Amino acid sequence: MGWIVRLPFFVILMGLGAIAMIVPATHAAVMEDFMTMRVFFYGFILFSILTLMIGLATAGYEPRSVARSQLVALLAAFSALPIMFAIPFHAAVGNTTFLNAWFEMVSSFTTTGATVYDTAGRLTPSQHLWRGLVGWLGGLLVWVTAVSIFAPMNLGGFEVRATGNAGKGAAGRFSQIAHIADPSERLVRYTLTLTPIYVGLTGLLWIGLVIAGEFPYIALVHAMSTLSTSGISPIGGLYFAASRFWGEVLIFCFFVFALSRLTFSRGLIGERDQGLRRDPEFITALVLIGTVTSALFLRHFIGAADGVEPANLQESAAALWGALFTVTSFLTTTGFESHFWDGAAEWSGLTTPGLFLIGMALIGGGVATTAGGVKLLRIYALYRHGEREQERLLHPSSIGGGGKDARRIRKQGAYISWVFFMLFALSIAAVMLMLSLTGVQFETSMVLAVSALSTTGPLAAVAAETPIAYSGIPDAAKVILAFAMVLGRLETLAIIALFNPEIWQR
């Protein structure tokens, strides 16, 4: 075990990726899809040997800063590992380009879920399983690295409540993470702690979906997609799912793990032991979900009331559930659309504005979760700062209460949140500009930019006036979107931290 810990982080990830290829190979053997089985088994052998060779060559490597090395390795993982994942996938699919296969793997590993294979029958079940597994592994990587790498460096949203600056060493409430062990030992410790939780929750949802009537392999992919918030589905979403309403209820219950890190890592990050009732992220999520769901339901209800036929209770309940599920799904950046979402539009005769879903995806889920977007904690910090500024307009000499933590969030936390929000907005503008240069229309480029940077791939099929097919955009646009997905997954501050001279002087 000790020699594995001493290997570079990227080499360890390569080895785990190679071992993961056994899963689709085994599934293909059971399904008698022997061509896919051979491709993934040969991929396992090839990349296992390659990992062994690189591991032997780098066994004695000792970086000056392990934390910096892990941050660089994380950037390399989301950029380079999809190439390794795409090689057997491209060979198994056959009638596709390597660019499309690489785009698919980048989308899966960054938990975006954008797919260029629009028809469900284009890929075999084992190939769909590989997409879901890659997304699931990407979600697990986000869970582990958020606590072991981002938290000690005050990145990934932790900078809002920390006393130190973003990209620097931890201080204050996160100092025990930084000083309890070296970064390699932290990475191993939190991997061993969080992996059983992640696997157990996925297995629990999988069993629940099978009991609800879903086909086992479809239930497994949907379970992995829910926990990783990738939104990957072998049947094009939940509309054709056999589990229908009860399956959506189960998935809805597991969305909570993308809204607050306290649901799975309580006490691990050195924060004060507080429950969900006092968690600002979870409370903010409830307010947003309740407000947007009520607005959408009232819009459809008023539209149905103006019709010739009066609205009945069943249609009203279906419209309410469809709005509640879909809004929560896009807030967590999963992107699953409820089976009853289209029924609400048919009930009222009004189309649902995609701007609501774009806004929810931009906000995103909780810090240190698999969700993307700006993150709820940053939105909460901006809200508290705005609330305090309004109080000062009415009472200029007033003193804000709430204790030291609340004052820090309203000042330093709001400042860094606003900086990140502006960087996020500039990133959207830059990606839109580059997409426009490839010939993509303005509205399409806006939706695609938001979906990539917020890691909400299914947004393209729902938010625009007409569904956008990733297979129909130019190859240059796919490359731009792939790098935008990596940027959205790692966040701009983490990449900017790599250019900080102080991090290279350690």
Image (cartoon, rainbow, N blue to C red):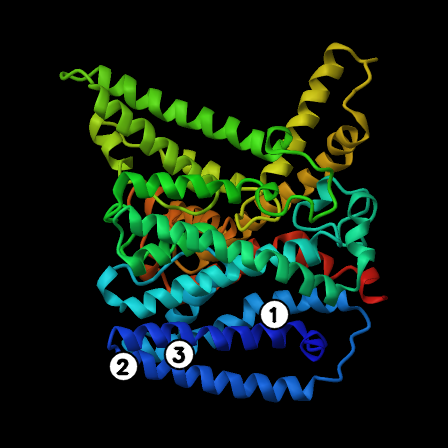
Residue wearing tag 2: 34
- Three-letter code for the amino acid on which mark 2 is drawn: Phe
Residue 49 image point, x, y percent? 53, 88
User: Which residue is the site of mark 1?
Assistant: 76
Res 61 seen here: yes
- Within the image, what quadrant is residue 5 found in? bottom right
Image position, residue 216 (x, y; %): 30, 58
Give, as a three-letter code, the residue at label 1: Ala
Question: Is residue 340 shown left or right of residue 451?
Answer: left
> In the picture provided, is 160 more to the left or to the right than 490?
right
Report x, y in % for residue 217: 31, 61
Give the residue at x 47% y 46%.
333
Sequence order check, earlier mark of 2 and 1: 2
Question: How many angstroms separate mark 2 from mark 1 (CA)?
Answer: 32 Å
Q: Earlier in the sequence, mark 1 or mark 3?
A: 1
Which mark is drawn over residue 88?
A: 3
Can you say whether 154 is above or below 299 in the image? Answer: below
Identify the image quadrant of residue 52: bottom right
Side (left or right) of 130 relative to 488: left
- Identity, as a three-letter code, of the amino acid under mark 3: Pro
* Label annotation for residue 111: none
For label 1, the SS is helix
Q: Nearer the viewer, residue 226 or 414?
A: 226
- Residue drawn at point x = 43 percent, y = 37 percent: 328
Cα distance between the residues tagged 2 and 3: 13 Å
In front: label 2 or label 1? 2
Q: Residues within 10 Å of mark 2 (few under 14, many from 20)?
A: some
Q: Is residue 462 above or below residue 168?
A: above
